[in-house]
Image (tube, grey):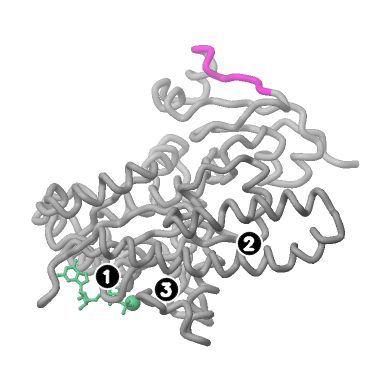
Amino acid sequence: MPLRCGLVGVPACGKTTVYNAVTSAGTSIFDAAESHRATVAVPDPRVDRLVELYRTGKIVRASVEIVDIPGLSEGSTAEGGRGSRLLAHIKEADALIHVVRCFAAPESPANPLRDIETIDLELMVADAQTVERKIARLVKRVRIGDKDVARESADCEKVLEGLHAGIPARNQELTETERASVADCNLISQKPVLYAANVASPRDADGPDVAVLRERASAEGSEVISICGREEADISELPPDDRGPFLAELGLAELSIDRLIRAAYRKLGLVDFFTAGEKEVHVWTCRRGDKAPVAAGKIHTDMEHGFIRMEVIAYDDLIGAGSEAAAAKAGKRRLEGRDYEIQDGDVVVIRFSPPR
Ligand SMILES: Nc1nc2c(ncn2[C@@H]2O[C@H](COP(=O)(O)OP(=O)(O)OP(=O)(O)O)[C@@H](O)[C@H]2O)c(=O)[nH]1
Ligand SMILES: [Mg+2]
């Protein structure tokens, strides 16, 4: 199951436009049941280099699921059935791509900060209700004198206070324990957020609206990718080989939505490692900090259970040397054990003993 990124934003900020651009740019598999949901391949130039190096035609790329969520405005998550459907879409996302309108609409100049605050407020109002319900459930058990429950309840109160003070859960300073106490709430203001500034032209990427947005994003440790939603959606409908002149006209070297997907993917806290050979180049995904056996288990559970060693060449070393043999000769092939933390870009071979 690929991880999920939900597109959120105020009405008419360009979410569907961005969704269309993202899903028609590369290989996408649309969900048969729902038209607003698709799995897209994560574009990665390293994979293309590996394919050249190993002269193989078979590629398995990493993928993420993108979900186009209807616009949120003040009070929309509270609107009965529609509100709870909206919330359900946001709840099931692993990260949010917040599309911010930085183009002027008729009679409505861009106002990125106001729009961001509208969305954050909606997320926080919904979260406050979730936390309040949890506290109400805990209260009964606190009365019985359960100490752990009392602490859990106090942790929830702290998060609730933060929400009331206008701080999304993702920006609250919480200890490991406090985080654990609200983990089952699946708070939507706690989900990692990446900002997509939807601009009318690439020139506006250096304009004042995007500058304001950047400042805001960096204050919470996030980043902004500028995209020309409308133009890029048009270009992405063309076959990849025909896009060049149109991108050049916009002054772009590549579709910004490619950068957007890669950034969203990073936001999910993922690292990619590769297996590569004449048969295929395969991208595997695991979480940052995963140890070698866990990573091996992504390929096959037998490789995790029977894990012996992992042969690793870093992508840059491999490309620098020009071949596996040359990298090995230059001492760039390492043998790593169970405690090795897999690094983004590792090209690996797993040594394992198969089950008998
Ligand atoms: N000028 C300009 N208009 C844009 C751009 N992106 C989207 N639009 C227009 O803005 C309007 C809304 O775009 P959508 O992509 O449908 O917006 P949305 O966020 O999906 O809207 P809801 O789903 O209703 O919340 C459309 O008329 C688009 O053509 C852009 O980059 N520049
Ligand atoms: Mg839409």
Residue annotated with mark 3 = 69
Indicate whether residue 296 is drawn in magenta: no
Q: Which mark is residue 185?
A: 2
Q: Is residue 58 visible?
A: no
Q: Is residue 243 visible?
A: yes
Nearest the camera: 333 or 138?
A: 138
User: Residue 247, percent across and down?
Assistant: 16, 55
Q: Which mark is residue 14?
A: 1
Amino acid of disc 3: Ile
Give the magenta-colored segment's residue range. Answer: 330-336
Badge 1 residue CB within 8 Å of ligand 1? yes
State the residue at coordinates (32%, 42%). Answer: 218
State the residue at coordinates (49%, 19%). Answer: 327
- Disc on the earlier residue, 2 or 3: 3
Other-residue count near label 1 (Cα within 10 Å), few / some / many at <14 / 14–19 / ≥20: many
Q: Quadrant of ligand 2?
A: bottom left
User: Residue 174, percent across and down?
Assistant: 57, 43
- Disc on the earlier residue, 1 or 3: 1
Alpha carbon distance from label 1 to label 2: 29 Å
User: Residue 58, percent across and down?
Assistant: 50, 51
> Which secondary structure lies at badge 2?
helix
Q: Is residue 118 left or right of residue 95?
A: left
Amino acid of disc 1: Gly
State the residue at coordinates (46%, 30%). Answer: 315
> Which secondary structure lies at badge 1?
loop
Above or below residue 24? Residue 280 is above
